[in-house]
Image (spheres, rainbow, N blue to C red):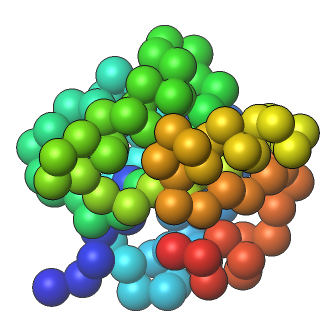
Amino acid sequence: MATTVLVVEDEKEIRELLRRYMERAVYAVVTTASGAEAIRLLGDGSVDLAVLDLDLPDVDGEEVLREAHAPGGIPVVVLTARSAVEDRIHGLRLGADDYVTKPFSPTEVGLRV
């Protein structure tokens, strides 16, 4: 059974680029632009790892990150435009397992996953 990666990204082009790249790397991929939908997917236990944008239109990505790291949670690679040192430190302190800033290399994100 393949590892399932949840890609949470509100920009459709980025979301689709990551989906295609992860599928080529033989991951099963679930995508959403919604923080609320991401929280629902995290709650049903159907994903093994998340690639998470922090700037979402409906729910702050930090809330999604906290949900992902609730007991029994999953690893999270944050992928965001928030690139200041303070932002990266804050994200890692919130529980991000890795932190990648935009613009990014899909190859790098894939390796981090």
**Relative to 91, 3 lies left or right:** left
What percent of the width, then of the height, locates residue 26? 40, 86
Residue at position x 67%, y 56% from top? 99
Instruction: Answer above or below: position of 84 versus 110.
Output: above
- Outermost residue, left direction? 44
Instruction: Answer above or below: position of 22 versus 37.
Output: below
Instruction: Answer above or below: position of 65 versus 58.
Output: below
Depth order, front residue of 12/112: 112
What percent of the width, then of the height, locates residue 91? 62, 41
Res. 113 in view: yes
What percent of the width, then of the height, locates residue 101? 80, 52
Q: For residue 89, what is the image quadrant?
A: top right
Depth order, front residue of 78/12: 78
Q: How many marks?
A: 0
**Relative to 102, 73 lies left or right:** left
Residue at position x 30%, y 35% from top? 67
Q: Quarter of the image containing the N terminus?
A: bottom left
Res. 41 in view: no
Residue at position x 74%, y 45% from top? 88
- Outermost residue, top direction? 58
Q: For residue 103, what is the image quadrant?
A: bottom right
What percent of the width, then of the height, locates residue 71? 17, 46
Residue at position x 24%, y 82% from top? 2
